[in-house]
Image: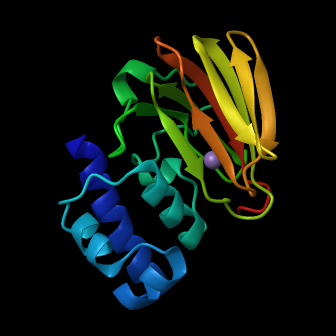
Amino acid sequence: MQELKNHLSTTLKHLRKNRGWSLDATAAATGVSKAMLGQIERGESSPTTAVLWKLATGFQVSISSLMEPLPEISADTVIRDAEEIRNIPGDKGMAVAPLFPFEPRFGFDLMELTFLPGYERVSEPHEPGVIEHITVMSGKMEILTDDIWQKLEKGQTIRFRGDKPHGYRNRNDEKAVTLSVIHYPHRT
Ligand code: MN
């Protein structure tokens, strides 16, 4: 939790410096308020998934790059453990483990997403071309796409456009553990 805050604080300052963006310019590009940006940079805020996505879309970076430093993954064979890298964003009812964070040569994020009972979030569109794939490993959940909540059970998988409004919810009494592949076709 604190690690997520610290990493995000460092990354946001770095991204802003890199782009030469003021807080005003960053607020305009991301839709995150100046006050919230300041809190994040001071490590005072636990950002929600919605805020993380706004930053990712505004800066045109992967969501995983905002969660933890890029691991040493230059080797061809890499083993990662979700238990060790699972984060809980500020919106609480979910957890995210960036199993294989985005690398330009592959063009995707592979994440474990856990949705607790009662969780519901409707997301703004991500950058153009982004496609999401969600596979349910345990429990049940629903994905909103094309204005329909699609029910998914263990073993089922869905592909949908991340660049249109979409949502995630769990109306059951057990958690849903899923694997998410987010493909960023235009990212370099
Ligand atoms: Mn999404």
Could you tell me which residue is drawn at 49 percent across and 85 percent down?
28
In terms of image quadrants, where is residue 96? Answer: top left
- Picture quarter with the N terminus: top left
Q: Position of residue 97 (x, y in %)?
A: 46, 31
Apparent side of residue 181 relative to residue 7 in the rendered image (left or right): right
Vertical placement of residue 153 versus 117, above or below: above
Protein image colouring: rainbow
> Does the rendering let one see residue 77?
no
**Residue 31 or 173: which is nearer the viewer?**
173
Apparent side of residue 144 relative to residue 33 in the rendered image (left or right): right
Apparent side of residue 24 relative to residue 101 in the rendered image (left or right): left
Q: Position of residue 17 (x, y in %)?
A: 39, 82
- Picture quarter with the C terminus: bottom right
Could you tell me which residue is drawn at 57 percent across and 62 percent down?
61
In terms of image quadrants, where is residue 181? Answer: top right
Could you tell me which residue is drawn at 74 percent across and 57 percent down?
163
**Residue 107 or 126: which is nearer the viewer?**
126
Could you tell me which residue is drawn at 47 percent across and 16 percent down?
175
Q: Position of residue 49 (x, y in %)?
A: 45, 49
Q: Position of residue 123 (x, y in %)?
A: 59, 52
> Does the rendering let one see residue 148?
yes
**Residue 80 or 16: which is nearer the viewer?**
16
Vertical placement of residue 136 versus 87, above or below: above
Vertical placement of residue 156 versus 18, above or below: above
Vertical placement of residue 140 versus 21, above or below: above
